[in-house]
Image (spheres, rainbow, N blue to C red):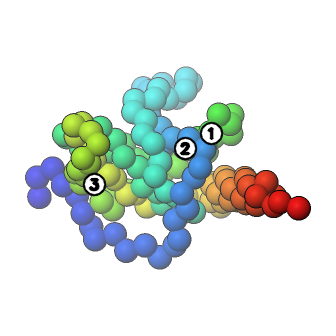
């Protein structure tokens, strides 16, 4: 299988694109649980649902298989959803004519998350949707010439 994982992801849940900067942070646990885990990698979230997300990261080699939990941050909000368990459903190279960097796209499915995790992720999605609707209403109001 080499450097590619593709489990023929079949989405059953609509994914939402987030307008604010959304980041998935991948942490490794420390030997002692008394201190916070340290962030090892972070990647921009492309889309998200209450059941999974997709992100892109730079690199020739997969690093996403090193982790089993992630944290989600949207925008410059202090709200984070910590320690979301996941498993990889796809991880493959993507090419782009705009850049010479090697990029990978990874899709993950949340694995046995708590109702609290699901509720908080749903709140993030709903807040982003509400912000987008408000921006669309303002844009429509500005286009009215009376």
Q: Secondary structure at mark 3?
A: strand
Q: Is residue 116 visible?
A: no
Q: Nearer the viewer, residue 116 or 140?
A: 140
Quadrant of the frame with the N terminus: bottom left
In which image quadrant can residue 21 be found?
top right
Q: Tell me, yes or no, whether the two marked residues, 2 and 1, touch with CB atoms within 8 Å.
A: yes
Q: Secondary structure at mark 1?
A: loop
Q: CA distance from mark 1 to mark 3?
A: 25 Å
Give residue 45's position: percent from left, percent from top.
47, 48
Residue density around tag 3, few if under 14, some if 14–19, many if 20 or more, within 10 Å: many
Residue at 15 percent across and 50 percent down: it is: 3
Residue at which label 2 appears: 22
- In the image, is residue 106 above or below residue 31? below
Query: Which is in the foreground here, disc 1 or disc 3?
Result: 1
Residue density around tag 2, few if under 14, some if 14–19, many if 20 or more, within 10 Å: many
Q: Residue furthest right?
A: 146
Q: Which mark is residue 138?
A: none
Residue at 43 percent across and 61 percent down: it is: 109
N-term mark: 2 or 1: 2
Q: Nearer the viewer, residue 59 or 88?
A: 59
Q: Is residue 15 visible?
A: yes
Count of labels shown?
Answer: 3
Residue at which label 3 appears: 91
Quadrant of the frame with the C terminus: bottom right
Residue at which label 1 appears: 75
Q: Secondary structure at mark 2?
A: strand
Residue at 41 percent across and 49 percent down: it is: 55
Give residue 67's position: percent from left, percent from top.
36, 43
- In the image, is residue 41 above or below residue 85? above
Residue at 24 percent across and 47 percent down: it is: 97
- In the image, is residue 125 above or below residue 7? above
């Amino acid at each position: 299988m080499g450097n590619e994982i593709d489990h023929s992801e079949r989405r059953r849940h609509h994914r939402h694109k987030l307008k604010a900067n959304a980041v998935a942070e991948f942490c490794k646990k420390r030997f002692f649980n008394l201190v916070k885990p340290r962030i090892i990698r972070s990647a921009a979230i492309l889309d998200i649902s209450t059941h999974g997300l997709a992100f892109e990261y730079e690199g020739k080699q997969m690093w996403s298989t090193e982790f089993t939990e992630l944290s989600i941050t949207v925008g410059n909000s202090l709200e984070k959803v910590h320690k979301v368990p996941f498993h990889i459903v796809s991880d493959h190279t993507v090419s782009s004519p705009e850049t010479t960097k090697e990029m990978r796209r990874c899709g993950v499915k949340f694995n046995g998350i708590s109702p609290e995790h699901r509720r908080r992720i749903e709140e993030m999605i709903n807040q982003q949707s509400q912000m987008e609707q408000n921006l669309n209403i303002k844009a429509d109001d500005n286009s009215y010439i009376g």
